[in-house]
Amino acid sequence: MNIVIEHNPSSIKLSELGVMSWPKWSCQPGKYALVFEERETCYLVKGKVKVYPKGSSSEFVEFGAGDLVTIPKGLSCTWDVSLFIDKHYKFDPPA
């Protein structure tokens, strides 16, 4: 699935990336079908989610609060949110 998760990145790294100035997105627990048109980097302030690639019910990646996550361009997936998500995010500019 090529989702890259960095658990508990340092505050220095988060500051260098400018994470706290990125837009915020949040959602309630539930299942959400998503397609990532561009590569997304996000930092979860709160929450927990399992991400299943389209068509899979057994393969998943799980991440949550304190994780810095890179989601590849073109990924079609279902987010199964178990705890309210509050995240900062940014998309790579289109090439």
Image (cartoon, grey):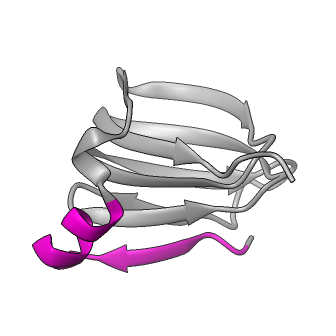
How far from the left and from the top, in percent, is residue 6? 37, 78
Q: Could you say which is closer to the camera, residue 14 or residue 35?
A: 14
Q: How many marks?
A: 0
On the image, which quarter does residue 43 sit in?
bottom left
Residue 6 lies within the magenta run? yes
Q: Identify the residue at horizontal 22%, vertical 45% (top origin).
A: 20
Please say whether residue 95 is visible from this viewpoint.
yes
Query: At 22% from the left edge and 55% from the top edge, which residue is drawn?
Result: 65
- Asked whether, in this view, residue 81 is left or right of residue 35, the answer is left
User: Do we see residue 45 in this rendering?
Assistant: no
Looking at the picture, does residue 62 appear above or below residue 89? below
- What is the x, y in percent for residue 57? 73, 53
Q: Quadrant of residue 15?
A: bottom left
Q: Which corner quadrant of the image does residue 66 belong to?
A: bottom left
User: Where is the N terminus found, in terms of image quarters?
Assistant: bottom right
2 up-or-down from 41: above or below: below
Q: Which residues are magenta?
A: 2-17
Look at the image and say whether residue 3 sits in the magenta stretch.
Answer: yes
